[in-house]
Image (cartoon, helix red, strand yellow):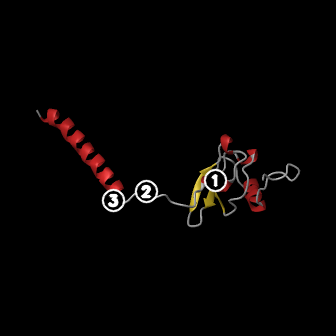
Amino acid sequence: MPRSLKKGPYVHPSILKHMSRTSGGSKSAIKTWARASTITPDMIGFLFAVHNGKTFIDVRIMEDMVGHHLGEFAPTRKFIRHGGRMQKEMEQKAADAEKEKAAAAKEPEKK
């Protein structure tokens, strides 16, 4: 359920304070743990360092991000890959095919 229009979008007060101190095109990032803060049109051009639970992810605010939350652009989970033995076999076949292509491409160059 979205937030009431009467209340307006939630933006953490410390973010507003830091935005008033810096300019929009600044190279220094505004560090924040407030992932729930909504991106407003005033934030366009600012660079935020959003905490993902381990590190800070740099997020430069663009026009099409307005209305979303800061946390949406700093994923908290790292996808490794699916599969096991079958996945490894498929990757090995793809790597072998790539090597053969490279070898075939190099042969005419030597002559």
What secondary structure is found at the residue carrying circle 1?
Answer: helix
Task: Find the residue positioned furthest to the right.
Answer: 6
Q: Position of residue 83 (x, y in %)?
A: 40, 57
**Label 1, residues with CA under 10 Å away: few <14, some 14-19, many ≥20:** some
Q: Position of residue 53 (x, y in %)?
A: 59, 66
Nearer the N terminus, badge 2 or badge 1?
Answer: 1
Q: Amino acid at mark 1?
A: Glu
Residue 72 tag number: 1
Can you identify the residue that label 3 sits on? 85
Q: Report the side of 56 relative to 6 (left or right).
A: left
In the image, 76 versus 63, the foreground residue is 76
Task: Find the residue positioned furthest to the bottom.
Answer: 54
Q: Amino acid at mark 2?
A: His
What secondary structure is found at the residue carrying circle 2?
Answer: loop
Point out the frontmost of discs 1 and 3.
Answer: 3
Q: Amino acid at mark 3?
A: Arg
Residues at marks 1 and 3 touching, judged by CB atoms closer than 8 Å: no
Q: Is residue 18 visible?
A: yes
Q: Report the side of 104 relative to 21 (left or right).
A: left
Residues at marks 2 and 1 touching, judged by CB atoms closer than 8 Å: no
What secondary structure is found at the residue carrying circle 3?
Answer: helix
Quarter of the image with the C terminus is top left
Nearer the N terminus, badge 1 or badge 3?
Answer: 1
Residue shown at 70%/61% (left/top)? 34
* Residue 100 picture quarter: top left
Distance in Å between CA atoms under marks 1 and 3: 33 Å
Residue shown at 24%/47% (left/top)? 96
Distance in Å between CA atoms under marks 2 and 3: 10 Å
- Looking at the image, residue 63 lies above or below residue 31: above
Can you identify the residue that label 2 sits on? 82
* Residue 105 picture quarter: top left
Residues at marks 2 and 3 touching, judged by CB atoms closer than 8 Å: no
